[in-house]
């Protein structure tokens, strides 16, 4: 049988900073809630941001990426979101060496 370690002392837990991940992992019913309505009235409305998902459609080409950003802006997006992958790490050698399918 494996020994179960003792939980940390209460004073040690209280001094350790909580990470965002720890806070997000808490059940909703344990998260802090405010009953201070004055704090809610101080909310300042800001225009929402629209994010355009470009993904990997730039195929690693800077000029294509710039063109896609221009199209996103023309469509009303505030931000363009890219992804970058290293295909050699994700694909088998056969898949990597195959011609790129162009629609």
Image (cartoon, rainbow, N blue to C red):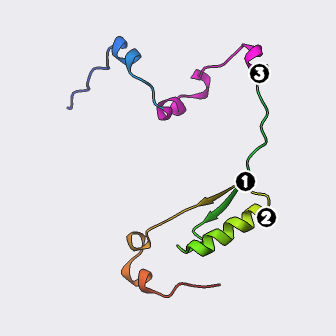
**Mark 1 / mark 3, whichever is N-terminal:** 3
Dividing the picture into quarters, in which one does residue 53 lie?
Answer: bottom right
Which percent across, then down, holds residue 74? 79, 64
Residue 36 in the magenta stretch? The answer is: yes
User: Where does label 2 land, which residue?
Assistant: 74
In the rendering, which numbered label is found on residue 42? Answer: 3
Does 33 sit above or below residue 61? above
Which percent across, then down, holds residue 96? 43, 80
Q: Secondary structure at mark 3?
A: loop
Q: Are marks 1 and 3 in contact (CB under 8 Å)?
A: no
User: Where does label 1 land, which residue?
Assistant: 78
How far apart are the two marked residues, 2 and 1, measured between alpha carbons? Answer: 10 Å
Q: Residues within 10 Å of mark 1 (few under 14, many from 20)?
A: some
How far apart are the two marked residues, 1 and 3, measured between alpha carbons? Answer: 25 Å
Q: Residues within 10 Å of mark 2 (few under 14, many from 20)?
A: few
Q: Which one is in front, 100 or 22?
A: 100
Q: How many marks?
A: 3
**Mark 2 / mark 3, whichever is N-terminal:** 3
Which percent across, then down, holds residue 85? 47, 66
- The residue range painted magenta reads 20-40
Q: Residues within 10 Å of mark 3 (few under 14, many from 20)?
A: few
Residue appearing at x 73%, y 63% in the figure: 72
Residue appearing at x 61%, y 85% in the figure: 102
Residue 24 in the magenta stretch? The answer is: yes
Q: Quadrant of the C terminus?
A: bottom right
Q: Are marks 2 and 3 in contact (CB under 8 Å)?
A: no
Query: What is the chief secondary structure element of the magenta stretch?
Result: helix
Q: Secondary structure at mark 2?
A: helix
Does 73 sit above or below residue 3? below
Which percent across, then down, holds residue 73? 75, 61
């Amino acid at each position: 049988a494996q020994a179960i370690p003792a939980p940390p002392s209460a004073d040690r837990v209280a001094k350790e900073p909580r990470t965002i991940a720890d806070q997000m992992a808490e059940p909703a019913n344990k998260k802090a809630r405010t009953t201070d309505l004055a704090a809610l009235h101080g909310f300042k409305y800001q225009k929402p941001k629209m994010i355009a998902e470009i993904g990997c459609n730039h195929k690693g080409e800077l000029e294509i990426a710039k063109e896609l950003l221009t199209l996103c802006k023309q469509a009303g997006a505030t931000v363009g979101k890219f992804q970058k992958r290293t295909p050699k790490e994700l694909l088998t050698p056969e898949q990597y060496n195959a011609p790129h399918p162009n629609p």
